[in-house]
């Protein structure tokens, strides 16, 4: 599961008035796998985007100090706080994410969000062609003694 799929799942849940908490619970349970990490990252970005929008509209939440600090932080600081929070996942992390998810769910009718357009992550195919190479000179020296081959030296050099 990719980061974009995690984002889409979060935006769809919000668009359809569904809570994010079950998605977060599943992502936290699978966080030790690459798909779980990608899902969690995508969901956290959705949560931060929603909190950004709430902050712009002046919406405040009544939560514990840690959750309130995240909700009231500036956008880039919020993302850093959420990443730091998720580095050492324990029950308190689940509680904080649960409170933030519940706050977002409580204002779901006031939100008008849509997922950002999907981007193609694959790099474009580039055609490469070698049109010229430097000239190479090769010098070979053979040493003989009494008609017998005693040594050779080969030197290659690009001009």
Image: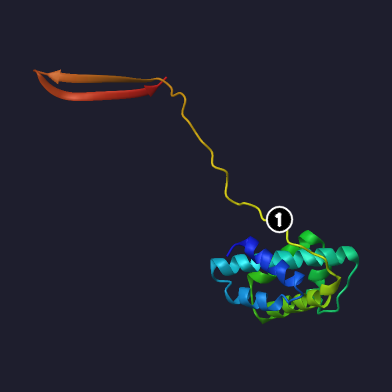
Residue at the extreme front of the image, as rendered: 16
Q: Report x, y in % for residue 132.
A: 46, 23
Q: Residue at x 71, y 55 (%)?
A: 117
Q: How many marks?
A: 1
Residue drawn 40% across the image and 20% down it:
135
On-image quarter of the C terminus: top left
Q: Is residue 95 depicted above or below 58 in this figure?
A: below
Residue 153 visible in rendering: yes
> Residue shown at 70%/78% (left/top)?
21
Q: Residue furthest left?
A: 146
Left or right relative to 30: residue 12: right
The quadrant of the picture occupied by the N terminus is bottom right
The image quarter in which residue 19 lies: bottom right
Quick one: label 1, few (<14), some, or many (20+) residues within 10 Å? few
Mark 1 — residue? 117
Q: Position of residue 151 (x, y in %)?
A: 19, 25
Residue 156 occupies quadrant: top left
Q: Where's residue 121, x and y in %?
A: 60, 52
Position of 88 compared to 15: left or right? left
Question: Tag 1's secondary structure?
Answer: loop
Task: Say which of 116 and 67 sits in front.
Answer: 116
As rendered, which of 142 and 66 lies closer to the eye?
Answer: 66
Residue 127 position within the rendered picture, expressed as x and y whole percent measured from the top left: 51, 36
């Amino acid at each position: 599961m990719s980061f974009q799929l995690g984002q889409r799942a979060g935006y769809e849940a919000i668009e359809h008035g569904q809570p994010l908490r079950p998605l977060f619970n599943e992502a936290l349970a699978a966080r030790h796998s690459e798909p779980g990490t990608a899902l969690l990252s995508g969901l956290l970005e959705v949560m931060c985007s929603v909190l950004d929008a709430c902050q712009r509209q002046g919406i405040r939440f009544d939560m514990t100090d840690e959750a309130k600090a995240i909700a009231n932080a500036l956008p880039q600081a919020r993302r850093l706080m959420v990443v730091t929070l998720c580095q050492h996942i324990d029950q308190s992390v689940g509680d904080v994410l649960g409170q933030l998810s519940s706050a977002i769910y409580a204002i779901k009718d006031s939100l008008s969000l849509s997922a950002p357009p999907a981007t193609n992550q694959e790099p474009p195919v580039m055609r490469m062609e070698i049109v010229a190479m430097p000239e190479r000179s090769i010098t070979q020296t053979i040493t003989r003694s009494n008609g017998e081959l005693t040594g050779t030296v080969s030197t290659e050099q690009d001009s």
